[in-house]
Amino acid sequence: MFNMRKFKHKITILVSVLLLLSLIIGGNIVFGGTELQNESIELTVYQNDLALVKEHRNLPIPTGIGSVSFANVAACIDPTSVRFTALTAPNIRVLEQNYEYDIVNDRKLLQKYLGQKISVTNSKGEIILGYLISADENLILSSQANSGQIQIIKAAQIQAISFPELPNGLIMRPTLVWLTNNPNKAGKQMTELTYLTTGLSWQANYVATINQDDNQVDLSSWVTLDNKSGTSYNEARLKLIAGDVNRVSKAEPGELRDVMYKAEATQGVENFSEKTFFEYHLYTLTRPTTLKEQQLKQVELLSATKIPAQKLFIYDSARNVKKIRTMLEFTNSTKNNLGMPLPKGIIRVQKADSDQALQFIGEDQIDHTPKDEKVRIYLGDAFDLTANRIQTNTKVINDTTHEESYQITLKNHKDTAVSVTALETFPTWGAVQITKADQKYAKNEANKIEFTVKVPANGQTIINYTVKIKN
């Protein structure tokens, strides 16, 4: 195919300029003789690459059977989800719907104009008229429609190409076209369009700053919206759905699009309001916002200070024989200056060093967290704490029952004593009973026990226990 990259910026499409000039009339848009005026737009964005768009427009609808166009819909629209209603004339019926998405570009223009007359301006400023018979590596023009002199124009020699008009079937924006039956007089009607689209998603990001004593955190959260849906949403009423919404799997679209991102942080006095919606949570931005095509936008979700927190050291033998995990835990409650249901997202934790410079100390992903539930963040493995677990004995009691004995050695190389929780997990298929233990333990689940012990500074603590397992 013709390589347009070498001179794409040089192409002048005269008809497109004329159309664009005719589009801008009094702040409204004219498409196919139909005046479109945005009345309102509402955007509900989900976390799994999905959005519900609801738009109200004042559209002229012809009497009887006629055509109505609705331009500037998302390029990633699911046409099967479209619902069109004439709010001011409910008796208007939609007989047929077409989704037009053959968007104009240089390659398609050349293909549409094969066999037709075009104008080419070369690098010397000379205008060459002819019938396009090939648009491969170079342009090939003929002086007549079916014969005549043949001329090859090298790609490097082309300065501009002009076309007499926009070919049928090519459009500038994705458009829905309805065949309507209107028993009323022709005139403007307030219409409502709702549809689902991919290419829109959001995620929550959290930053927690822990104090020097590791017992309080300041928490801020931002919503990051990503718009790759193929259109912009101006002054939209924005709502976010947090929760695990089930969707039927579909094949991925065959066309991959290049994406250029722009980050825009929106610092606002007004935050999101939150309420329960079905089995999910709904976050509504209390002011309109514009989400441009190919844009990342950040909006503050919450900010809270002096949240009581606790640093935990947890040894889980099922995860690692040697390492002791460092965790940060706090409760999402009103009492702790929180209490808003927290959407799932990545939380990053930082702390000031001795020079009062904030340093990154770990991150984790939290799940959807209702109010009054605990948030536990895995930060990394403790440097100065180690663990060693060995099996000291095994004993077969009968065909269905046996005993196992273990020793866990926890070492602390810090200059201060610490509390460490050792978590032991047993097979779920057997009945578990601790028959001997030299440290106190808690059994919160049928197949799990926890030892929480003090480990002295520069010292160690040993845990010995025996468990009986019945198959």
Image (tube, rainbow, N blue to C red):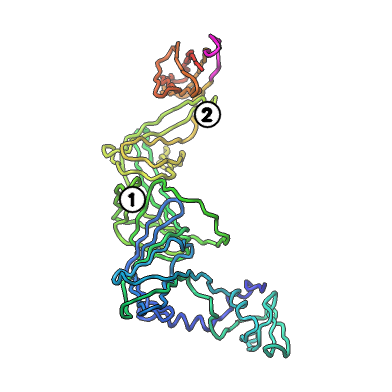
Q: Quadrant of the N terminus?
A: bottom right
At label 2, counting other C-alpha atoms closer than 10 Å, the crowd grade (few under 14, some 14-19, many 20 or more) is few
| Residue name at image x 52 percent, y 54 percent | 250
Point out the tag, 2 or 1, that comes first from the N-terminus.
1
**Residue closer to the observer: 211 or 111:** 111
Whether the magenta-drawn stretch holds residue 320 is answered as no
Nearest the viewer among 333 and 435 is: 435
Eyeballing the image, is 292 above or below 382? below
Q: Position of residue 323 (x, y in %)?
A: 52, 27
Residue sitting nearer the eye, 57 or 464:
57
> Residue 310, image x and y in percent?
36, 31
- The majority secondary structure of the magenta stretch comes to strand
Q: Is residue 100 visible?
A: yes
Q: The magenta stretch spans which residues?
A: 389-401
Q: CA distance from mark 2 to mark 1?
A: 36 Å
* Residue beneath disc 2: 319
